[in-house]
Amino acid sequence: MLNRKGIGIELSKKWVKLGQQRLEEEVSNHTNQKILEGDSREVLKNFSTDSISYIVTSPPYWRILTKKTHEKKRKDRSAKGFDTNYGFSKNDLGNISDYQEFLNELSICFKECFRILQNKKYTSIIVSDFRHGSELVPFHSHVVELCQKIGFKLQGIGILVQNSKKLYPYGYPFAYVPNIHHQFILTFKKAVL
């Protein structure tokens, strides 16, 4: 709406089409907006170094819709006509079975983001912590560590509250298992001397 140029990257043809449809419906002048279909680990290599002035991303969550603890959520999504799996592509980071391998592959994306981002510019990464069995995985902390190792400087952590999500009685009455109804907005700066 501010006539800025925007480029999106999406792995799945289905979500590319949905993104293009939303641009057509919601943005009167969407000619400056593009959605590229492909694996961001590869597509980002095509961008020139220091060519992008702001990056916002919400990377895939590790196996988020395949967890047994999400059975009720899958039924709710199915009843509403929503997908219960984002795809089965071997290139989908969310389908990687090992968490450390998932983080390693995600790091490849963040390294490319660092390379293409202009100096003294910002990136915002939207993530949520999640449960894996009985363990709470502090995904936002892991993303902060990855990005700082690459060279990004953490500038701030915002909270995106999701008040419309249902509450579930996880663990009741045997254990305290909180619902997660927020995401973190991690904002980093590229500051190369």
Image (cartoon, helix red, strand yellow):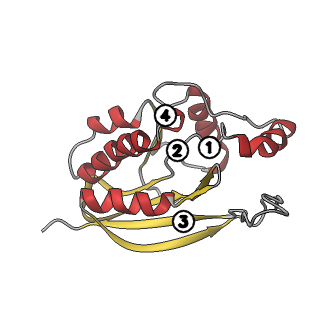
Dot label at residue 96: 4
Dot label at residue 141: none
Outermost residue, front direction?
Answer: 174
**Disc 3 marks which residue?**
184
Indicate the secondary structure of the residue bearing disc 1. Answer: loop
Are the residues at dot 2 and dot 4 in contact (C-beta closer than 8 Å)? Answer: no
Q: Tell me the number on the disc at residue 60.
A: 2
Mark with earlier residue (3, 4): 4
Which residue type carries mark 2? Pro
Which secondary structure lies at badge 4?
Answer: loop
CB of mark 1 within 8 Å of CB of mark 2? yes
The residue labelled by disc 1 is 64
Gap between marks 1 and 4 measured at Cα:
11 Å
**Residue 1 image-quadrant placement:** bottom right
The structure residue drawn at horizontal position 64% and vertical position 49%, both measured from the top left corner, is 133
The front one of 162 and 46 is: 162
Q: Secondary structure at mark 2?
A: loop
Q: Earlier in the sequence, mark 3 or mark 1?
A: 1
